[in-house]
Image: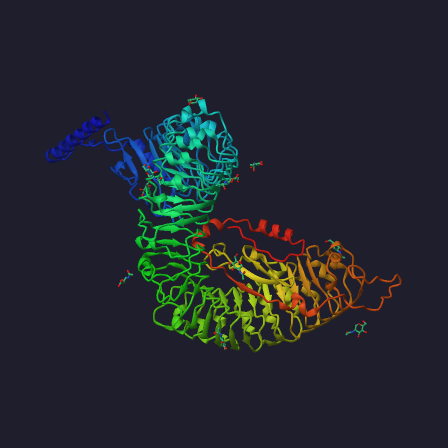
Amino acid sequence: MERSMRVVLLLIRVLAFATITFSIGLCNGIPGWPPLCKESERQALLMFKHDLEDPANWLSSWVAEEGSDCCSWTGVVCDQITGYIHELHLNSSDSDREFHYLFGGKINPSLLSLKHLNYLDLSNNNFSTTQIPSFFGSMTSLTHLNLADSGFYGIIPHKLGNLSSLRYLNLSSFYYSNLMVENLQWISGLSLLKHLDLSYVNLSRASDWLQVTNMLPSLAELIMFDCQLDQIPHLPTANFIQNMTCLKVLNLRWNDFNSTVPEWLYSLNNLESLLLSGNALRGEISSSIGNLKSLRHFDISGNSISGPIPMSLGNLSSLVELDISRNQFNGTFIEVIGKLKLLTDLDISYNWFEGVVSEVSFSNLTKLKHFIAKGNSFTLKTSRDWLPPFQLENLQLDSWHLGPQWPMWLQTQTQLTDLSLSGTGISSTIPTWFWNLTSQVEYLNLSHNQLYGQIQNISVAPYSIVDLSSNHFTGALPIVPTSLYWLDLSNSSFSGSVFHFFCDRPDEPKQRVFLYLGNNLLTGKVPDCWMSWQSLYFLHLENNNLTGNVPMSMGYLRYLRSLHLRNNHLYGELPHSLQNCSSLSVVDLGGNGFVGSIPIWIGESLSNLQVLNLRSNEFEGDIPSQVCYLKSLQILDLAHNKLSGTIPRCFHNLSSMAGVSKSGWLEGYGISNSYIPEYSILVTKGIEVNYTKNLKFVKSMDLSCNFMHGEIPEELTGLLELQSLNLSNNRFTGRIPSKIGNMAQLESLDFSMNQLDAEIPLSMTNLTFLSHLNLSYNNLTGRIPESTQLQSLDQSSFVGNELCGPPLNKNCSANGVIPPPTDGGGYRLLEDEWFYVSLGVGFFTGFWIVLGSLLVNMPWSILLSQLLNRIALKMYHVIVEYV
Ligand SMILES: *[C@@H]1O[C@H](CO)[C@@H](O)[C@H](O)[C@H]1NC(C)=O
Ligand SMILES: *[C@@H]1O[C@H](CO)[C@@H](O)[C@H](O)[C@H]1NC(C)=O
Ligand SMILES: *[C@@H]1O[C@H](CO)[C@@H](O)[C@H](O)[C@H]1NC(C)=O
Ligand SMILES: *[C@@H]1O[C@H](CO)[C@@H](O)[C@H](O)[C@H]1NC(C)=O
Ligand SMILES: *[C@@H]1O[C@H](CO)[C@@H](O)[C@H](O)[C@H]1NC(C)=O
Ligand SMILES: *[C@@H]1O[C@H](CO)[C@@H](O)[C@H](O)[C@H]1NC(C)=O
Ligand SMILES: *[C@@H]1O[C@H](CO)[C@@H](O)[C@H](O)[C@H]1NC(C)=O
Ligand SMILES: *[C@@H]1O[C@H](CO)[C@@H](O)[C@H](O)[C@H]1NC(C)=O
Ligand SMILES: *[C@@H]1O[C@H](CO)[C@@H](O)[C@H](O)[C@H]1NC(C)=O
Ligand SMILES: *[C@@H]1O[C@H](CO)[C@@H](O)[C@H](O)[C@H]1NC(C)=O
């Protein structure tokens, strides 16, 4: 029927064309055919344009000139026969949205004059000063209304419910997320609706969302992505789903559902896409899932679903994409997947699956392209000459048991772009053929295995990420493409000089932005050819056997944020040129033999510094007062040097430690800091603590084991956010600052082995987080102030003084006379862990591109407060992990 109508229309048009041609030839045309647009509609459009902002002059063809046919104007579509305006395409392009939009301003109600308008697309614009005009609800001829990302704000007018002809409605609002509803009753007026997209609209008040959408019997696509819905109602199935038989796409990703999956969902047997990821759904998947025979795309990732995968899932023979990652499924699952012959995308990563998987399980999966299964404990057993039936592009089996042999079947996989086999127990060399497969690989992770042997050459696609860390590779560093983006060869046994790695091909600029070579056996001088490495952001060479000076040419690394040279055999003075590296945020030069005074330019030029670690070197002289310029400094470790002089009074200007300025971790360098998983080993409470995700909150100062003298300035107590302060093993005299109690965040405080005298200030009882205190071996006198905190500490915190009262056994005599000192009671100085402290900062070589999206919104502050709570007790190890 429809087709024959079209044929008729086409005939009419051909005839019309012939007529026009004919008539033009005869008498200069007949006005009115094809129909010009209606004058009233033309005026309406001109009024509409008048109120619109059109910075790109996109509507330049919309002119008031006599005879200008508005049917030929940009974005206007008229009916070919009647000349009435049917469609207005006034959207910007989705992909350009971030950079520019076409229209802003106001929407003139003159649109109401377009009585035959059925298609209105205003998406991807910026009407950010207005609400959705309620007169839209009077444009009852509309069948298609797209206001996605148009910048409208506020409550969606209920009047839209009058658009009873509407088949397509898109109000999603990703860029603005400004829209909300009071309820969704009005939706029930749109009884012909097929496609409804309310993504990012705040629907938290619309607890009726399901009952209402159930009144739309034609609804085929329901998209409510990230709408702050907190309930997915559990209603009786029988009569309920009658009206939802047309539903093909149900997208409820990223809401706050925390119930079980309701039973009625399994009855929507026309569903093709069921997308429930990013909620907090619990319980098990019912075996009724097998009813959803049409399902092609099932995504339930990122919930808390547990239990086995029902066998009936294997009946979903249409399934093309299946994502059940990041749940708590257990058992073996592979027999079920083995039946899904059409699967191209399978993600079962981060579940609790275990058991043995054999090659037979994969025999039907001929179409598989993306197989992401990391974070499970499967054991893969294949014959040595297995020829897999699939050709994968993305394979991620991290933490599977694949080893100890190298998986030879990889040889058949010639299309790989992502390959991740971290922590899979492979203990072998990498066969030479492997590097013939990797030329188009963009992400290669073979870390945390027992791979050994030498690597001559790494060839991967441009801008790739390569992580071969934590293995047993030997020999010289391999030759790698200059275009590599991220290279991690740390924690291995690479040896020999680093000269060729850094200095070959000096005229080819290296793209490498993240370079991790720490924890190897690298030797030789730090080469002086950094001119071609100007893209470097992160440079890790710590824990090697490098010698020589820091070369002048390192001054070329002006984007460098993180420089780790700790624990090598470097010496000499720091070159002035380093002051050009003004992006530096983290400098860790500890455990070398650097000499000279602490350079003044550190304070003057490295204004972004957040971590300065010069521990265990031979620095001498005063701490320059310019260090006080470092407003972002959070960790200052100058311990174990030969520094003399006094503590600069200006230290209270270290405003990040004082809590005055809140600088973000590695902020302001273009890369969002939350993309970079990081760790730092910090000595606090006399033990090494591996801080990971919460590192950005750590604030610590360590000046211990130097020759500093004078009084501890009262100003130091202005560093209100310090959690750890160590001034031990110096020659400080005078009193403990009386306002020490202001430093309420202190967890660890060490003033031991100085010459401090007088009484312990009473305010110390206010340090309620204090779990490690060492005041031993000073000349303190009097009664230890009483608080639950101080009395719960060990005696060793106070020995070697003239103190009395608990926790010491010495009673304070009633008249204030202190009994003669006795031995501290088995306290053996040299066995105190306090003497084996060392501080280091490093960055975990994670994969920020992959993890980035997950980390962006992590609630740091919650983690911090949890951490602080936990250290109420003396704590020996903290590793906070939450990826
Ligand atoms: C409007 O959207 C359509 C797709 O819906 C797109 O093809 C077109 O390019 C967009 N218009 C503009 C000007 O970007
Ligand atoms: C089904 O839709 C009709 C018409 O919109 C409505 O009257 C009826 O209440 C709906 N049924 C259920 C169970 O919601
Ligand atoms: C689910 O969330 C609601 C509010 O969002 C809360 O009151 C309820 O305790 C949660 N239930 C579970 C089981 O977590
Ligand atoms: C899966 O987990 C459930 C509860 O968490 C447990 O009862 C069951 O034994 C587990 N199944 C397997 C195969 O480990
Ligand atoms: C592969 O498909 C065949 C035929 O459908 C079936 O009999 C067999 O069990 C499937 N193999 C696996 C491993 O599921
Ligand atoms: C790898 O490729 C090179 C040339 O591209 C070829 O000479 C060599 O034989 C290949 N090695 C293997 C093991 O396939
Ligand atoms: C490290 O260097 C020192 C001399 O600088 C040398 O004695 C030592 O053998 C080297 N160690 C390794 C593992 O290369
Ligand atoms: C610290 O923790 C991170 C993340 O768990 C880890 O990658 C790193 O190896 C740890 N460092 C040390 C020295 O334990
Ligand atoms: C402890 O802190 C409270 C309030 O923070 C203050 O009133 C009190 O004086 C402090 N005590 C001492 C001894 O400083
Ligand atoms: C300790 O203090 C007492 C009295 O305050 C003083 O006589 C003595 O010299 C001091 N000892 C040291 C080592 O400073």
Q: How is the image coloured?
A: rainbow
Residue 848 occupies which quadrant of the picture? bottom left
Taking the image as drawn, is residue 437 in sight?
A: yes
Name, please, the residue furthest toward the right.
815
Residue at far front of view = 383
798 vs 114, left or right, is right
| Camera-side residue of 157 and 635 | 635
**Residue 38 screen position, x and y as percent:** 28, 31
| Residue 798 on image: x %, y % | 75, 64
Measured as percent of width and height from the top left, residue 57 is found at 33, 46
Query: Is residue 51 in view from this perspective?
Result: no
Residue in the picture at 59% in, 59% down: 698
Foreground pick, 730 / 673 = 730
Q: Nearer the viewer, residue 119 or 872?
A: 872
Q: Nearer the viewer, residue 502 or 433?
A: 433
Asked if residue 40 lies left or right of residue 637, the reply is left
Quarter holding the N terminus is: top left
Left or right for 33, reference 526: left
Which residue is depicted at the point 47% across and 49% down? 854
Q: Is residue 312 above or below residue 345?
A: above
User: Percent position (x, y) of residue 835?
Assistant: 65, 68
Judge whether 583 appears above or below 310 on screen.
Answer: below
Say if 444 sits above or below 21 in the image.
below
Quadrant in the rendering for residue 73: top left
Q: Quadrant of ligand 9?
A: bottom right
Q: What is the total number of numbered labels drawn onto the structure image?
A: 0
